Image: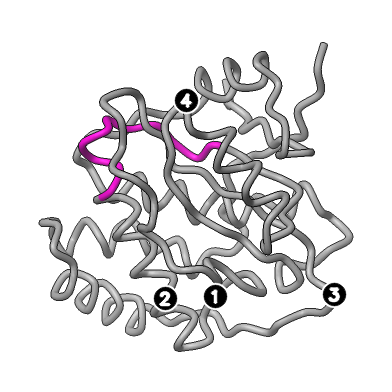
Amino acid sequence: MVKFVPAYQGIERIHETWMQEAIRTAPHYRTSVAPAINRTIGCIHGLQDLHPKTDLLQLEVYLGRATITTLEQRWTSHAKGNKKHRYGAIICCCDHDQVERLEDLAVRAITRLKAKQLLCVGNANKWDGNQGLKPRPELAVIYMTWRELDKEIPFTRPSIKEIRQLSNEIHEESPYQTTRGQLLRGLRILKRIQSRVPLRWWQPS
């Protein structure tokens, strides 16, 4: 049975029932990097299902980390601050001592993709990542929030050569240990824009 990611509208206030469902349906990753990267990119691709009349080129995505008790505070900040994001979803869960590692690798990948104009969305992580407080010793989450942009920002789909180069660069510069193979397996989905994690809008029952 396919588990849909319950996407949330109105992120300035979180419904407790949504949180329970989002945690229940999110996979829990430990030290394996490839599936976490693959799922993150697949969730971004899946935004097309939520916004069928809006191209990915016209969406701005932010990736971040939180814990189950700090998520609402983070999302309220995204909604009411400069970001003006309206929507959110939990991509995956992980142990609190692994979340900074996963976030670091994600932010490094996005930073390099933006510099090379290879993003699959109009904009991502416009604000620097890894600025949160040290995670509490409780269940941590990798999440994304997003909004629609006024205009499209074009991108170019990366080649396998560029993805391999990206994997090597992240491997060399990240302070967190992981293999080139893990990074490459996770990033290969960049070439497959139709490879999506299924998302659907959550509605209270």
Instruction: Please tell me the numbered disc located at residue 119.
Output: 1
Q: How are the colours assigned in the image? A: one colour
The secondary structure type at the circle numbered 2 is: helix
Q: Earlier in the sequence, mark 2 or mark 4?
A: 4
Label 2 is placed on what type of residue?
Answer: Thr
Label 3 is placed on what type of residue?
Answer: Asp
Q: Position of residue 65 (x, y in %)?
A: 42, 45
Q: Position of residue 22 (x, y in %)?
A: 57, 25
- What is the CA distance from the residue labelled 2 to the residue labelled 4? 28 Å
The secondary structure type at the circle numbered 1 is: loop
Q: Earlier in the sequence, mark 1 or mark 4?
A: 4
Q: Nearer the viewer, residue 99 or 196?
A: 99
The secondary structure type at the circle numbered 3 is: loop
Q: Which residue is mark 4?
A: 69
Instruction: Please tell me the numbered disc located at residue 111.
Output: 2
Q: Quadrant of the C terminus?
A: top right
- What is the CA distance from the residue labelled 1 to the residue labelled 2? 9 Å
